[in-house]
Amino acid sequence: MTEAVLSVRGLTRSFGDHRVLADLDLDVPAGTAAVLVGPNGAGKSTALRCITGADEADAGTVEVLGEAFDERSATIRAALAVVMDDLDFFPDLTVVEHLDLFARAHRTEDADDVVDDVLEEVGLTAQSGQLPTSLSSGQRRRLALASAFVRPRRLLVLDEPEQRLDQEGLDWLVTRLRAEKAAGLAILLASHSPRLVEAVADEVVSLDRSGTAGAGRP
């Protein structure tokens, strides 16, 4: 197997007496997608937050490209693109300004062309001059995903990216994630969508409310 872009060992997280994650092990090689599934409260979002540094695990290790995870690392910052459900937008920036800022902050080559292409792909060209607060919930979700697609990345981490997308949006997301894998990216996502899981997962990790995980093929 190709060397893992993301490697997780023994990830454990508790809140008080409640064990949310127990010894989660996970490898995601380049060009593959791993999907966390399970009921609400099973720890999917907690796992993603611990893996990306938004929360601190009680035990375990996370490596990205063979380097221990440290959000201060330039290598890891350049490799990791994350879209969580609680992504904050810049309230005073328009859609296109928001994406332009993300692209330029991450030194995207040909930033103007990349932003224009992604705007067209996510169906927000007509809304490019609007503020995020004026968008529908589905459009805001597309904008959140677009913020990851306008920047360089080796590892894409998404928390239930299908939320608030209609069927057309879900079809687009499937196509996009398959293209990301074909381009050699590693993808880790949590999802409740059987369609998305079946279409993109190379490995499915099932979490339950006891904090334990079981891995298998889709």
Image (spheres, rainbow, N blue to C red):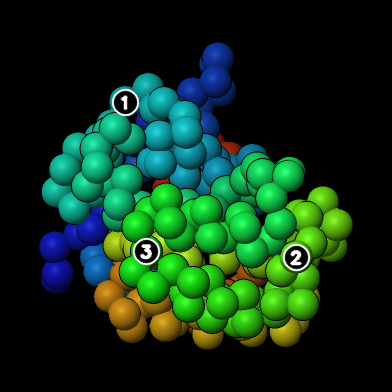
What amino acid does circle 3 point to?
A: Thr
Is 89 above or below relative to 161?
A: above
Q: Secondary structure at mark 3?
A: loop
Q: Which residue is mark 1?
A: 59
Name the quarter where the C terminus is drawn: bottom left
Is 10 above or below relative to 152?
A: above
Estimate the x, y position of residue 170 in percent, counting from the top left.
66, 78
Q: Which residue is mark 2?
A: 129
Q: Nearer the viewer, mark 2 or mark 1?
A: 2
Estimate the x, y position of residue 92 in percent, counting from the top left.
73, 44
Closer to the camera, 137 or 9?
A: 137
How packed mark 3 is, by other alpha carbons closer than 10 Å (few <14, some 14-19, many 20 or more), is some
Q: Secondary structure at mark 1?
A: strand
Q: Which residue is mark 3?
A: 108
Spatial CA span between label 3 and label 2: 21 Å
Closer to the camera, 140 or 186?
A: 140
Estimate the x, y position of residue 19 in percent, counting from the top left.
50, 27
